[in-house]
Image: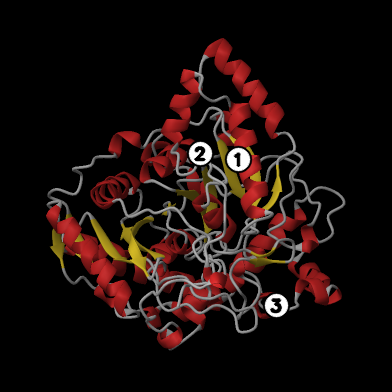
Amino acid sequence: MERRAFLRSGAVAGLAALAGRVAAGPSERAAAVPAFELAETGIADLQAGLSAGRFTARSLVLEYLERIETVDRSGPTLRSILETNPDALSIADALDAERGARGARGPLHGIPILLKDNIDTADRMTTTAGSLALEGSVAAQDSAVARRLREAGAILLAKTNMSEWANFRSERSSSGWSGRGGQCRNPYVLDRNPCGSSSGSGAATSASLGAAAIGTETDGSIVCPSNACGLVGLKPTVGLVSRAGIIPISHTQDTAGPMARTVRDAAIVLGAIAGPDPSDAVTAPAGTRGHADYLPFLDAAGAKGARIGVARQFFGFHGEVDRVIGDALDALAKLGAELIDPVELPDGREYGENELTVLLYEFKADLNAYLAALPAGARIRTLADAIAFNEKHLEREMPFFGQELFLRSQALGPLTEPAYRRALRANLKLLRAKGLDAALDRERLDAIVAPTGGPAWPTDLVNGDHYVGGSSSPAAIAGYPSITVPAGAVHGLPVGLSFLGRAWSEPVLLRLAYAFEQATLHRRAPEFWPTLPA
């Protein structure tokens, strides 16, 4: 959750344009990482190898586990994985036997997938949101996302590190830090930040520690780490993917979604996890508005004739980012898209404080409900318990930053209070009817584009994150979908282009994103530089 999108002000100067690269000195050389057979390999190619007998599910698990040891726990030491599934090999063996007897269930059969550590799995892995307060907590049942992935034949390989409590604990935290996992690192430049609460999912997927990952987003936590780690990240319409069994922030904005190295892989994973769930009433429309297979919507010529609005208000925070996104707009025009430039969306000053009010109220109510339902023996049952735990374990849980947002949330009343209801009503009206819907309808647009965010900043545990700009909030607050795609780089650091759309428009966004991706192919594998060359 990119809470500083509405907490900070005037941070544009936080990242200055860097000087051009010169030859790297001895201390600046990229980390030596052994060649990896599966690096950058897509899900379709893995599935083809499984079908042809070149791989088995067991061999894939072994390859990825060795990669985790080599890259995450030693070598560059990304700290993106909290724990691996001790049953992964036995699950793989069962899926290999099933393939031999009955064939594959679908495109994810035997494919190792990573899950963010706020997504329940009823196995020998824990679900902790990165907090020591939930260390050892094992869910009584799978989250709907985990269950759907298992039903599709995926292997839940590992839980990824994350910003503790989805980055909703402190007003000056460092993204990617958790009490359990320490500071996650960006695989492109190790002393830079992976961004967002789905930081481990971003870093691990970019470094090919799994075929793809599931992240969660309240405001920016799928698209921001995807931007910083050179990935495709899709934040679905709220209601397309069940939130049942996911440690929450906000029932009006939370959603899980795929993080992958290609649009095709994101589409495959989305098809597996999308759909209605009786445990999450907001997903009821997904039965008719969602799809079991999003691959048919991918079209390399899909931008031709599309009307795409340009949200210029999200430009201007970094000159080099503007240059990269300007080139992306030129690429879309060459693909036959008609650019309507500019289109206006509501100003962040109109909704930022209301968003924070809504999240503070909903966090207390939603987290208390999740914690109350934990199995017997849980260390904490309420937000108040979590606050007390952090105070008691100050040295391990709060060595760098505190729990100001926890305290502000705990001080609030129930969701019946007028302050909450006014803020929620105002923001939904502003960002839906008067915002995205109005802009899309007025200009007859298929989507709106904007820079996803800036290049990754140096990690700073003392002062916290250094966001310079981003475009996640309109879709996040409205509950509408967005997708980010690699659009280029600034001094070797990835930068993404976001496509925003109306509710349930994932097919359109995937079509446009795929066309842009196939025409530009900006994704580059990380090289694990220790620091940015001078």
* Circle 3 SS class: loop
Do labels 1 and 2 touch, CB within 8 Å?
Answer: yes
For the N terminus, the image quarter is bottom right
Q: Residue at x 39, y 33 (%)?
A: 293
Task: Check disc 1: other Cα within 10 Å, few if <14, some if 14-19, many if 20+.
Answer: many
Numbered circles on residues, count: 3
- Of 430 and 303, nearer the camera is 303
Q: Nearer the viewer, mark 2 or mark 3?
A: 2
Q: Nearer the viewer, residue 67 or 256?
A: 67
Q: Secondary structure at mark 1?
A: helix
Q: Which residue is mark 3?
A: 403
Q: Is residue 335 left or right of residue 9?
A: left
User: Residue 64 bears which disc, if any?
Assistant: 1
The earlier-in-sequence mark between 1 and 3 is 1
124 sits left or right of 199 in the view = right
**Image color mode:** secondary structure
The earlier-in-sequence mark between 1 and 2 is 2
Residue 38's mark?
2
